[in-house]
Image: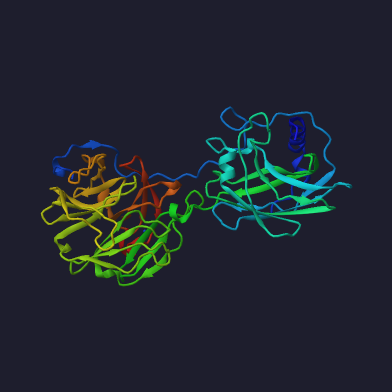
Amino acid sequence: MPTSRLLAVSAAAVLMPLALAAPALAGTPGTPGTTPATAATTTATAAPSTTTATAPAAPQGPKATDGGHAAPDAQAQPAVPTGVVTQSQVPQVTAGQPNGGFTQFTVRLPEGTTGPLSALLAFEPYQLPPAGYTPSRVAAALHSSCSVNGGPYRACGWLGGVDDGDDPLAGYVRLPMPAADAGTTLTYRVQISADYGTLPADQLLHGWLRVSDADGNAVAVGSAQVQYLKGEAPAGRRGVLYARDTAGVLWRYEGNDTTQSTEPFKPRARIGDGWNAYTAIVPLGAQSAAATGDLLARDKDGVLWYYVHTGDPARPFAPRVRVGAGWNIYTALSATSDSTGRHADLVARDQDGNLWRYRATGNTGAPLTGRVLVGAGWNAYTAITPYGDGVVARDASGVLWSYGARLTDNGDDPFEPRVKVGAGWNVYTALSRSNVGYNAAPDSLIARDAAGRLWWYGQKSAHIPGGRTYVGAGWNIYSVIF
């Protein structure tokens, strides 16, 4: 098709008033190589101050800026094709949902139209947000199946690129429809789904459907709309919190997408009973709503057991596997964090205050290697839990210290010198790393006070918790939270 004709048809579609064919939208209770007393100490933040989480700012409308997608230039408007395109409904496309949204276009062709016809559904690129949401990226995240005149649905692929001057539509997000023979009317049915993260926020997209004859002449055109909904983050991107009650029942709190909800957790789900057989339960690796992350649990006889994750949220752990006996020589068990891509290992403190490290192998039959001494003096701490890429530890006076992981780990000296987080942490009866958080925090800390109130600490930095946010009351019914 000649460039001049394509430009004219594109301009006619863009300049058409969208309102003419746009139908209305349908409308809790969660080494250091040196002795900690002599390790290098620096101060990071003060005691746990309370802050209030704020909702994310509402997305701004499309703007033509140097850093975004420029609006199409106005051009002389040619005669508008006499055929009429009507969209029956605006599809609601929720990201991450496989079924997507459905819409139908009915095309009334001009009298005398003959030959095979092509159709193109297109959306102007200036609507797309800046910061990398290019037409090609958006098109790659959209998926459709199409039907013409009641025929079978077939996969049809979205396209997107850059306007190079030769093809003005190359920069549009567009969907070519299957070819059809001319008739009095045509009916196009389209199902649209989108990957999570296709766009950063809910957005109503405006575009048009154009039908052309074999020579590329537009015979019908009309406006089109798609309502994109951001949706909830996939389960693998949301955290989970486990809690054992005093009767030994284990409960699961699946994390909400807190960019979409003010509640951090969904209603709790029962996993099973008998968990009061254990004197220590250690999450090995980040637990997610997709049932990832393993567990280590020590029973009252000192036997250590390994629970492998299943990937099934209704049954998150496979039957336990025996690791070995003799683990009651340790007064504290904890994992190191894997939030920076490192594997989570087990650390264990003995009665003399020595900290030992057991590397995780990922092998169900032999999940841990032999122990390596990290350092002495760890009996100064009353609580040790994973955080950041290492651990945090609270001393007897209530000061919380952070041990970040060394970039170069030779096995017996995994942590950097400790950094002071702040005082006042002895108000808490339970501390645990959590990846359930507000505003999509990648790693956080959960703390329960003596009154049973649960608090959430986001990240100030990779190794330091930030201000706290109140989660809810009633959490003193649990003897273990992880």
Q: Is residue 141 above or below residue 1?
A: below
Whether residue 460 sits left or right of residue 348 in the image: it is right
Q: Locate residue 362, reporting x and y percent.
A: 29, 57
Q: Locate residue 177, reporting x and y percent.
A: 70, 49
Whether residue 432 sits left or right of residue 86 in the image: it is left
Q: Locate residue 372, reporting x and y percent.
A: 16, 51
Q: Is residue 276 above or below residue 34?
A: below
Considering every residue shown, the one lying at the far left of the view is 352
Q: Residue at x 72, y 53 (%)?
A: 89
Considering every residue shown, the one lying at the far top of the view is 66
Depth check, front residue: 88 or 468: 88
Q: Which quadrant, please, contains the N terminus?
A: top right
Identify the image's colour scheme: rainbow, by chain, secondary structure or one colour.
Answer: rainbow
Depth check, front residue: 151 or 14: 151
Q: Is residue 410 above or below residue 165?
A: below
Q: Which quadrant, please, contains the C terminus?
A: bottom left
Q: Residue at x 53, y 41 (%)?
A: 57
Q: Locate residue 311, reporting x and y percent.
A: 41, 61
Depth check, front residue: 278 or 371: 371
Can residue 28 be spotted in the picture? no
Q: Residue at x 17, y 52 (%)?
A: 356
Q: Residue at x 26, y 47 (%)?
A: 392
Q: Is residue 264 above or below residue 411?
A: below
How many numbered tags mark residues here?
A: 0
Can residue 320 be spotted in the picture? yes
